[in-house]
Image: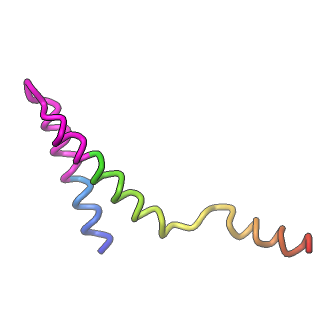
Amino acid sequence: MKTIYIVLFFAAAFVALYEQSTGHPNMFIMISCIVIFMMGMMKLMSKVPSKNQGDNNEENHNDV
C-alpha cells in the first residue's frame, strides 16, 4: 500500500510541474495535484512515530 502512495505522489508532482510549464496552466488541475500530494503525505506520516514520543512517556511516568 505504501508503494501505491509513493507512485501517486510522484505522478501528482509530475502532472503539477508539467501543467505549470504550459502557457496557460489550469488551476483546477494544479490544486487537485496539490491536494492529492498533501493527503498522501498525511497518510504516510501518520504511521511514523514522533522522535520524542518515548522520552515524553518516560518523563510522565517519573513525575507521577
Residue at horizontal 21 percent and vertical 50 percent from the top: 12
Q: 15 or 30, which lies in front?
A: 30
- Residue 57's x, y, as percent? 76, 71
The residue closer to the viewer here, 26 or 61, is 26
On screen, residue 19 versus residue 58, left or right, reads: left
User: Eyeballing the image, is 37 above or below 18?
Assistant: below
Determine whether 5 is above or below 15 in the image: below
From which residue to which does the magenta span run? 11-33
Residue 7 in the image: state x and y as whole percent. 22, 61
| Residue 60 image point, x, y percent | 83, 70
The mark tally for this picture is 0
Say which quarter of the image contains residue 31.
Answer: top left
Image point 27% across, 55% down: which residue?
A: 9
Relative side of 61 to 8, left or right: right
The C terminus lies in quadrant: bottom right
Position of 2 relative to 10 (above/below):
below
64 in magenta: no
Q: Is residue 32 left or right of residue 51?
A: left
* Residue 14 part of the magenta-drawn span: yes
The quarter of the displayed image where residue 3 is located: bottom left
Q: Quadrant of residue 19?
A: top left
Q: Where does residue 20 sit, x and y in percent of width and height?
A: 17, 32
Residue farthest toward the top in the current orientation of the protein: 23
